[in-house]
Amino acid sequence: MTFYVYISCIVIGLLLSLFFYYFKKKYKLHERSHAFILFLIVYVLSFELYAYFLVEQGEKNVLVYNVFFVIGETILILVYLGSLIEAKRIKRNLKYFILFFIAWAVFNTLFIQSPIVIFQQYTHLLGSLGIVIFCCYLMFSVFMAEKNEDAPLLSLPQFWNIAAILLFYSASFIYFGSLNMLWTLDTYYITILASLNRIFAATLYLIFGFSYYSPLIFSPKSD
């Protein structure tokens, strides 16, 4: 997947999310997390464009990705997942994990992987692992709650968002976890794997934009 296709997918997700305000008002939908997801899409689009601008200027963009993707986006995703968790003990554990993640990011920056030289793989791996674990917990919670409610699973925006996050960060964990071994491969295969990772990322932001329409599409009332 080329950069332009990837950015186009993010823009489509952004437009879908913006246009949802019309349906939100028309059908009196109450999706509290929509504004946060919209902010997240704008945040990602902004740093991706800035990173691309730096490359076009002949400068390195690794610091941008380390700060805004590895650390910033990870924290934002964890905050979003925390807003979906109802169990106080799990919510408290997620807060502890965020603090631990930040501490590890600082330690990794100071003593192991310089953010201006190399992609901070170790920080990203910890963040991805935490996101995957909490996503698995939330998916189980959503499935259990769906059994006791009339709303179809596909009509729940959080189900789509959690599934998309789980898909991307599971693939991302495997990709960046094996990054050192990938450098021994031919450039052609590395390009394919990087493109696949970008496809998962594009899918994530497209689903972010689409997910809040799911009550209108899959709800029994829309039949």
Image (cartoon, grey):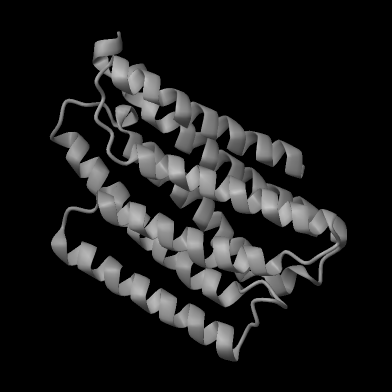
How many badges with numbers are in the image?
0
- What residue appears at the point 21 percent right and 26 percent down from the top-left corner? 151
* Percent coordinates x, y for residue 123 in the rendering: 53, 74
User: Is 17 above or below relative to 217?
Assistant: below
- What residue appears at the point 60 percent right and 49 percent down from the top-left corner? 46
Residue 189, picture quadrant:
bottom right
* Percent coordinates x, y for residue 14 in the rendering: 53, 34
* Horizontal side, residue 42 vs residue 220: left or right: right
- What residue appears at the point 17 percent right and 53 percent down from the top-left corner? 86
* Percent coordinates x, y for residue 79 in the rendering: 34, 57
Q: Quadrant of the C terminus?
A: top left
User: Is 151 above or below relative to 77?
Assistant: above
User: Is 121 above or below relative to 147?
Assistant: below
* Horizontal side, residue 140 vs residue 150: left or right: right
User: Is 110 above or below relative to 139?
Assistant: below
- What residue appears at the point 37 percent right and 25 percent down from the top-left corner? 214
Residue 174 or 44: which is nearer the viewer? 44
Residue 65, picture quadrant:
bottom right
* Percent coordinates x, y for residue 188 in the rendering: 86, 55
* Horizontal side, residue 60 vs residue 23: left or right: right
